[in-house]
Each structure stands twice: as C-alpha cells, then as structure tokens.
Image (cartoon, coloured by chain):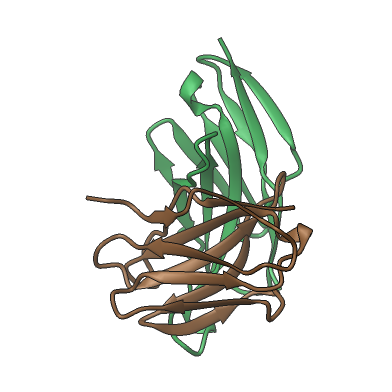
Chain colours: A green, B brown
Amino acid sequence: AQTVTQSQPEMSVQEAETVTLSCTYDTSESDYYLFWYKQPPSRQMILVIRQEAYKQQNATENRFSVNFQKAAKSFSLKISDSQLGDAAMYFCAYRSADYYYSGGSNYKLTFGKGTLLTVNP
Amino acid sequence: DAGVTQSPTHLIKTRGQQVTLRCSPISGHKSVSWYQQVLGQGPQFIFQYYEKEERGRGNFPDRFSARQFPNYSSELNVNALLLGDSALYLCASSFGSNTEAFFGQGTRLTVV
C-alpha cells in the first residue's frame, strides 16, 4: 500500500515571501501521479498542481512549483510571492496509474495529513 | 457550469441511526469518489464508482455502502452510526480515469 507523509503540521510565511511545504511518499510502483490540494476554511479541496511520475520536468503553475525527486520519493511544493489568499490547509496526494487496476479506471487518492499554512501580513 | 454539489451541507444524527448523503457530479463526469475526512486528518478513500459500477473500496466496514445512478449522481449510505463516523464527507467527480478530480464542499456529519 502507498503512504504519504507530510512532516510539517504547520508553517507560516510573511506576505510576498516564499515558503516550501514538504511531502514524502512510499510506493513500489513506477508510474503514478502526485498532487497538491489546497483546502481553505470553505472546506472545498482545490487542485493546486499535478505531477506525472514519468515526467522529469517539475510542474509549475504560476506562483506554485514543485520539486519532484523520484528516487528520493519526495514531492515538495514551493509557493512564491505568498498572498493572504494562500492561507489554507495543504494536502499532498498520490494516485496509482490506471493499469495497476483491472477495471482500467482508478481515482483513488491517498492523502497525507496536511500542513496548515498561515500567511502573515 | 455548476461544480460538484453535495447535500445536505450539515447533518446531526444519533448513534445507531442511518444516514444518506448525496452527490451530483459535474455534468459529463462519469466517475464519482467518496472520502471521509476526520478533523485534523487528510481525506480517506471510501468508494469509487465509474459508469455505475463500483471500481474501488477503501478499508471501511460494511456499514458503509454507496451506489451510482444512471444520471451519474451518487449516494453514500452509512448504517448503525457510531460516534467515530463524525466527519466531513467529500465527494469528487472526474470525467475519466486520467483527468482531474473536482471536489464538492462536503457534508459535515455529526453523530451524537
């Protein structure tokens, strides 16, 4: 079974500064997807960024970027120019590639316990 | 376009009762998944349905069941409620297996 570990229960950053959230995972699979989700107080999980394991290039979405180290099984999220609206719970998640499932379709996400990000004005 | 909608938003039940939670996926999405998020934890996978068939089940007791209807909406049923079932229940929909999952705002279930 796959596991996802987020070792930082809480992080804080000053507005306009950069912060990095850590995530490690354990799997024996070679093909998978990794995600960072944001959950604000409204409770809705919002996808921040996605990385395919077969892609060596780190994913980037505007101010959000990842550092994907496949051999080390590490997947950190960097938020640049932090804004007050970035304050939320951040979850790292793992999904196996579809061909591991006989049904050919899978959307089981395995989440970490989350990191609460506070942005200070 | 409407996002994933869940109903009700909040619910209070008594131990031993049964509850039904509902989810309407984004139009055109055929896959629906259910997650349980206990306070202070990450979501835990309960079920996935794709084209009205169960495609995955997490490590939850048989008191939890679900189904998907021809219009791809879904219901999650929990029987014989326990205090430990108190949680936020999230529904996610996706068009297919290799596409992004979109989450609803969840149903907050409190068992007293």
Of the pair B84 and A13, the residue shown nearer to us:
B84
Going by the image, does A46 lie left or right of A8? left
The residue located at (71%, 58%) in the rendering is: B14
Q: Residue furthest top?
A: A121
The number of callouts visible is: 0
How far across and how far down the image is residue A29, in percent?
62, 74
How far across and how far down the image is residue A88, in percent?
56, 32
Of the pair B3 and A108, the residue shown nearer to us:
B3
Of the pair A105 and A50, the residue shown nearer to us:
A105
Q: Residue furthest left?
A: B1
Of the pair A103 and B46, the residue shown nearer to us:
B46
Q: Is residue B10 above or below residue A40?
A: below
Q: Is residue A114 above or below residue B25?
A: above
Using the rendered image of the protein, determine whether residue A81 is visible from the camera's viewpoint: no
The residue located at (67%, 57%) in the rendering is: A73
Could you say which quadrant of the image residue B25 lies in? Answer: bottom left
In which quadrant is the C terminus of chain A drawn?
A: top right
Going by the image, does B74 lie left or right of A53? left
Q: Residue furthest bottom?
A: A102
The residue located at (45%, 60%) in the rendering is: B92
In which quadrant is the N terminus of chain A drawn?
A: bottom right
The residue located at (72%, 44%) in the rendering is: B40
How far across and how far down the image is residue B100, in percent?
39, 59
Q: Is residue A26 above or below residue B112?
A: below
Using the rendered image of the protein, determine whether residue B60 is visible from the camera's viewpoint: yes
Going by the image, does B50 lie left or right of B40? left
How far across and how far down the image is residue A7, in percent?
76, 43
